[in-house]
Image (cartoon, grey):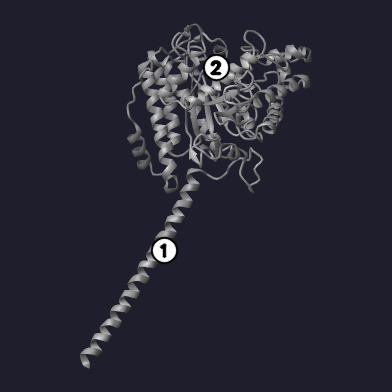
Amino acid sequence: METSYREEEARRKASLLHCIFFFLLGALAMAAAIAVLHESSYWEWRCNRLTDIVVDGDDGDGPSSSEVVDGGGEWGMVRTRGAQFVVGGGRPFYVNGFNTYWLMVLAVDPSTRGKVTEVFRQAAAVGLTVCRTWAFNDGGWRALQKSPGVYDEEVFKALDFVVSEARKHKIRLILPLINNWDDYGGKAQYVRWAQAAAAGAGADAFFSDETVRGYFKSHVTAVLTRVNAYTGVAYRDDPTIMAWELMNEPRCASDPTGDTLQAWIAEMAFHVKSVDPAHLLGVGAEGFYGPSSPPARLRVNPNADVALAGADFVRNHRVLGVDFASVHVYPDTWLPAGATKEAQLRFATSWVEAHIADAEGALGGMPVLFAEFGVSTRGARAAFNATSRDAFIEAVYGAMLRSTRRGGGGAGALLWQVFPEGTDYMDDGYAVVLPRAAATAGIVAAHSRRLQSFNSRCAWSCRWGCNKRDNDTAETTTAEADVDVSFHHEL
């Protein structure tokens, strides 16, 4: 009897201990789950601050127009989330890209059309993911728009070919809609068409003359609603197009206050979004600080004259409908004559860093794309040659990587410019022919790998803290990705 009682008492104690053990185990599991959810939520917010700019009419109650178009796939529309570009379900998309502005013109002629394919193939081989090229040629030789609203179908088909070839090589496009300069027609051609020069501002009447503004709006509509003859997809529905730019390097020196250009940007941004709310929109600006900028920022400008160009970086990019900031980097032509190579490198670094800081701060967390950067290797002013130019490219890439490591607003940079072989007759001194520039190709490829590593890691680990402020972790991630990639010319 005594033995049975003791055994029963031992069983009761063991059962109680088991209950306490499993209760504590459950409590620990619950605490861990709460911590994970908190960590996940916090770092997801850090990695992609959920401050999407409303650019597509999304009221929050249903799918956005870009989600309807692309289904959220990997080749879906590029969107913005906070200070980042994102694709798919929110994967960061940091850009290593290039400019080749003349693709449409060469695609018109069957004898040169293969150069389009060639440059895309070579760019893809070193990991370049975005190409910026003209979606305009107004008047003149091989004009897309021969007169207001009148288009050459063969030239339009050439642009269709460029878009379709870019897609085949998994390269996205940024398409400016007009030029500030006279090349390829530009704003001066529109003024001539409207005989509006009597307005007193010369080519700058483009921004204020009602007839001219109407011509440009019609052109915007014609391009955005174009149905690609090769793919059957309307441009405004095609995720191959990453973004539109209102103008290449807009300036309005006839009104240094900036009011005229500002009003034009606001009007045209609204029009673009009314036709195509799904794609991103940029201004196409060079990044100069204007009269509304504080003195500290005016001192960042490369010279005093650019503050009177009628453009103003922060003000221009606060316009409703503008999704990302754009900046160009040309120390060789902007700085005073005689600037040394070292001075140009210092300027390039400080110029990039100042605009990243303003995109993150004054612009409230907006991606900034350095849509053109380059230095010439020709002419009396050239401080660089084809070899030393690599130091300039590395300086820009280095500034971008410092932003990327912390998940900052430096969203990408596009080299001006990449040429295939056999097009030297169009070289303006800035061309990089990748098969003939092995060292440069290696630098470009290594930068592509670093960005791809970051994008890929963030795709699966972002909510676990891919943008933590742990510098050691960031340095490790970069070091692991810092591999030497050789360029292999594809025949």
For the residue marked with disc 2, what is the amino acid?
Tyr
Residue at image point 66% right, 40% down: 57
Quarter occupied by residue 230: top right
Which residue does the numbered mark 1 point to in the structure image? 30
Residue 485 percent coordinates (x, y) = 34, 25
Q: How packed is label 2: few (under 14 Cα within 10 Å), some, or many (20 or more)? A: some
Would you place residue 347 above or below residue 382 in this image?
below
Assign the N terminus to one quadrant of the image.
bottom left
Q: How packed is label 1: few (under 14 Cα within 10 Å), some, or many (20 or more)? A: few
Label 2 vs label 1: CA separation? 57 Å
Assign the C terminus to one quadrant of the image.
top left
Q: Earlier in the sequence, mark 2 or mark 1?
A: 1
Q: Residue furthest left?
A: 3
Residue at image point 38% right, 67% down: 26
Is residue 303 visible in the rendered image? The answer is no
* 464 to the left or right of 152: left
Residue 297 percent coordinates (x, y) = 56, 29
Which residue does the numbered mark 2 point to in the structure image? 101
Is residue 453 visible in the rendered image? The answer is yes
* 59 to the left or right of 334: right
Residue 318 percent coordinates (x, y) = 64, 34
Toward the viewer: 102 or 251? 102
Mark 2 falls on what kind of element? loop
Toward the viewer: 259 or 445? 445
For the residue marked with disc 1, what is the amino acid?
Met
